[in-house]
Amino acid sequence: MTSHQAYHCDALIIGSGAAGLSLALKLAQDLNVIVLSKGPLAEGSTYYAQGGIAAVFDENDSIESHVDDTLKAGAGLCDKDAVFFTASRAKAALHWLIELGTPFDQETNALGEARFHLTREGGHSHRRILHAADATGKAVQTTLVDQIHDHPNIRVFEGFNAIDLIAGGEGDNRRCIGAYVWSNEERRVFTIGAPFVTLATGGASKVYQYTSNPDIASGDGIAMAWRAGCRVANMEFNQFHPTCLFHPKAQNFLLSEALRGEGAILRRPDGSPFMGDFHPDKELAPRDVVARAIDFEMKRLGADCMFLDISHQDPEFIQHHFPTIYQRCLDLGIDITKEPMPIVPAAHYTCGGVIADKHAQTDLPGLYAIGEVAYTGLHGANRMASNSLLECVVYAHAAAEHIMLQRDKVRIAEALPIWDESQVTDSDEEVIIQHNWHELRLFMWDYVGIVRTNKRLARAARRIEMLQQEIHEYYSNFRVTNNLLELRNLVQVAELIVQCAMQRHESRGLHYNLDYPNQLDDPKPTIIAPSRKT
C-alpha cells in the first residue's frame, strides 16, 4: 500500500467490543462497514466482563423497578428519560443476543420448565442479571465475533489505532467524514473516509495506576471527540470496582460482583465483617459505597488489602457458578472454597464521556458514540452493576436505526486531507513516553482517586499541564507510535477528569471530596466544552 492510501466505507466503527460489533452486525445488513480493532478482535473490556447483563425477565420484576434501582444507584444524576429508554429496550436487546447464540445460563423450575438463571448484584432489588457462568463478557464477545467473521459487508482491521477524526465542511455544514488511523504492524498512517463514524472505544481507566481494564482502555474516543469539538460530561465519576484480586501475579483480575450477590462477605484481615458499619445493604450496597468502605478500612488499619469470603457456600455451588474465578484463584494458590480472597479496589468504569443523545449522536454531525465512551445520562454519579453491557447493545441498535434513516441523505463530496509527516522524524527517546506514562497514572491514583481534596486536584492539574507541554512538543517533532498516541489521549482525558472534579463542589456517588463532604440540593451534570474546534 502507498504511504497515503485511503479506504472508504459507508460506516466506520472505531472499537470492537460489544457496542462496536453489535452496531456492525446491524448496519451490515445494508451497508459496507469497516471495524477498527486496536488489538486482537477478541480483546477489550467486553471480553473480561464477568457479571452479566440486566433485564427484566422475572414475572415478579418490572421495568419500573429496574428504572428506580438505576436512578437510586446514580445518586440523583441520572437522566430519567435515558434510564427508561434503556430499561424498556433491555429485554429486546437480550433476545437479540440470545438469537445470535449467546449461551446464557439456564435452570429448571419446579414444573420442569427451562428458564434463564437470574442472579442479583449490588443496587438491584430483584434477580434480573442474565449471565454465562462468571464469564458473560467472553460469551457475548465470542458470539459477536463468530457472527462478524466472513461477513461479506464487514471488514475488520486488527491492530489499528485511530489518531484523530476528520471533519469537513464549515459552520452548520461541518460534519465528521472519516479518521486518520495508525497501523501498528505496518507502522504507517492512512485515512478512512465514511459518511457515518462511530466511537465505540470504551473507557479511560488506564489513566489510573490500578485498573481492572485491559491495556487498551486509554480514553482514545473521548480525547478524539474533544479535539474534534464535542462536549463531554461527568468525567469526575470514575467507578472503582471494589473487588480486584490482590496478588502480584493476578494482573488486575476482577472478582465479579455476582460473588457478593451469591452471599460472599467482605472481611477485615482479622476475619471480622465490616460492611454492616457502612450501609444497611451491606455487601449489596452500590459500588461507590463498597469501594469507599474498603478504602477506608485499608487506610484506617494500614492494611494492604481486605478479604472477600465465599467459603461458607457449598463447594459444588462455587465451582458451578464461578468456574473462571475458582480456577484462576486456584492457579495462584488460593482455594476459594476453603479460604477468603485478598482484594483491593481498582479503576473499573468511566461513567462520563462524550455527550450522546438517544440516537447516540454527538455534537458533531456524522459522529456517534456508544458504550463506555459515551455519556447518555444512564449512569449518573454511579453505574449500577450489569447496566454497562446492556447500554452497549441498546445504544448500538439505536444508532443503527438512526444511521439507516440518514443513509440516503448524506454523501461525502470532498477529498480527505492527507496525513503530513514531512516535518517529523523517528524518535530515539522512547523512554520519555514510558516515564510520563508512569508519572501520570501514579499521580492520578494518588490525587484523583477514590477520595479527593481540592489540594490534591490542584496538584494533579499542575502536573497535567506540564505533561501536556512535553507531550505536545514530542508529538509535533516525532512520528507517531502506539504508545505516544495512547499517552497523548490519556493526558487529555486526565485533564477532563480533573476539570470536572474541580467544578463539582459536593460529594456525590463516585466523586468524594473531603473539602465538600455534603450533597447539593439541586445537582446537575458537569458539562464542559472545548474552547475552540480544531
Image: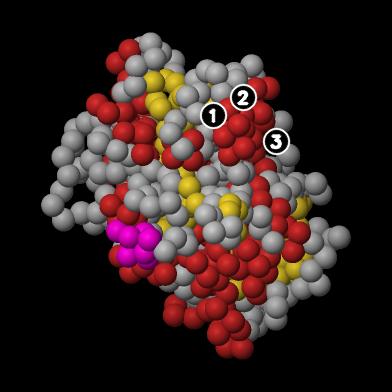
Q: State if disc 2 and disc 3 touch (CB < 8 Å).
A: no
**Which amino acid lies under the numbered mark 2 shown in the image of this protein?**
Cys
Give percent across and percent down for residue 367.
Answer: 53, 69
**Number of marks in picture:** 3
Amino acid type, callout 3: Ser
Other-residue count near label 3 (Cα within 10 Å), few / some / many at <14 / 14–19 / ≥20: some
Q: Give the extent of the magenta segment.
A: 60-68
Q: Earlier in the sequence, mark 3 or mark 1?
A: 1
Q: Which residue was labeled with disc 1? A: 314
Q: Is residue 189 visible?
A: no
Circle 1: residue type = Asp
Residue depicted at x 54% and y 52%: 117
Label 1: state its secondary structure: loop
**Neighbours of disc 2 within 10 Å: few (<14), some (14-19), many (20+):** some
Residue located at (57% from left, 32% from top): 318
In this figure, which residue is indicated by the disc labeled 2? 329
Judging by the rendered image, the residue that carries numbered circle 3 is 427
